[in-house]
Amino acid sequence: MRLISIIFASLLATPALSCGPDTDCALGERHYRIAMPDGHDGTTAVGAIVFAHGYRGSARGIMRNQNLRRMVSDMGLALIAVKSASDDWVLPNSPRRKDVDGSVEFNYMDAVIADASSRFAIDTDRMMMTGFSAGGMMTWNMACHRPDMFAGFVPISGTFWLEAPAECAGPVANVIHIHGDDDPTVPLAGRPIADTHQGDVMEALDMYATYGGFGPSATRNTERLACKDRSNPAGDILNFCMFEGGHSFRSEYVKFGWETFAGSGKL
C-alpha cells in the first residue's frame, strides 16, 4: 500500500508528462502543445521553434503537420504550437477589434514560454518565433512588442493589420519576412477585410528599417527564395524574401530562417 501511495504521489508531482504533441498543455482557459525532438533524454536543454497558426487554425493542426514535426525534430529542436483563444489572434486593428492593444496575446505568449521552460528542458536563449498568415501577423506583433523574447522572428505571409505601428519596443529584433510574390489572400499591399484592412508589407519593412537603423539591402537568392538582406551597425538582421506563388507554406522556410539566424550567431 505504501508503494502504491508513493507512486500515486509521484504521478501527481510530475505534470510535465501530462502534455505534449498530442495533448494540450493547459494555461487557464488557453493552451499550447509541444513536441520535443525524437530521442530527447528529458534533461538536456534544447532550442525551440514557436509556431503561430493561421486563421481558424489550431495547435493540434500544427502538430499534425508531420513534415514540420520531423524537420524540427531532425534539427534537434522543440516545436511549440501556440493557440489563439478563438478563431483568430486578438491583435491591434484586426477585424472588429480596432480598440485592442494586443496585450492579451502578448501576455499569453509570456505565459507559454514560462510554462514550457518550467515543464521541459528548453534553452530560452535559443528560441525563434514563426507563423503563417494570421500567425505571421502574430509574429510581426511579437517582434514589435516582445522583441527580447526570441532570438529571431520569421513572419510568413502575414504582417500588421491596417498599418505598421508608429514605433516598437526595444531592443531591435532580428526579422526575416517571407511572402509569395502573387499572394491573393494576403497581398503584399494588403486588402480590405470586414471593417479593417490588411497592412502593406513594404510599409512594415520600411518602418522597421527606420526604427532599427538598417542599411541598404543586398540581394541573396536560394533555390526557392529571392531575398533582400539588411543589417544595422549592431549586426541585427532585417531580411525580406519572396517565393514564386501565392498563399502557401513550406516547412523549409522555417528551417531557412533558423539557419540564417544561426549562421549569423543569433542562435
Image: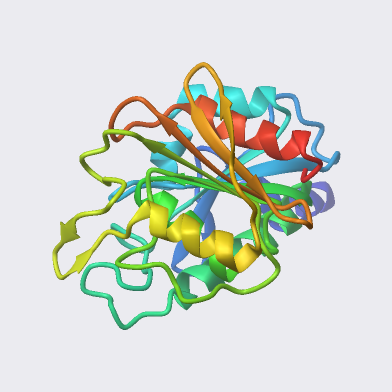
Q: Is residue 174 left or right of residue 200?
A: right
Q: Residue furthest left?
A: 194
Can you give x and y, in whole percent of width and height, for residue 56 in the image?
28, 50
Can you give x and y, in whole percent of width and height, for residue 44 in the image?
86, 39
Q: Is residue 116 left or right of residue 33?
A: right
The residue under the point 83% across, 47% down is: 3
Q: Is residue 236 left or right of residue 223?
A: right
235 and 95: which one is in front?
235
Q: Residue furthest top?
A: 223
Residue 239, placed above or below residue 2: above
75 and 160: which one is in front?
160
Can you give x and y, in whole percent of width and height, for residue 182 in the image?
27, 33
Indicate the quadrant containing the C terminus: top left, top right, bottom left or bottom right.
top right
Write down the quadrant of residue 27 in the picture: bottom right
Is residue 159 in view? no
219 and 251: which one is in front?
219
Residue 2, placed above or below residue 41: below
Q: How many marks?
A: 0
Residue 148, placed above or below residue 225: below
The residue under the point 57% across, 59% down is: 209
Is residue 197 in view? yes
Q: Residue furthest bottom?
A: 99
The residue under the point 23% across, 68% down is: 95
Q: How is the image coloured?
A: rainbow
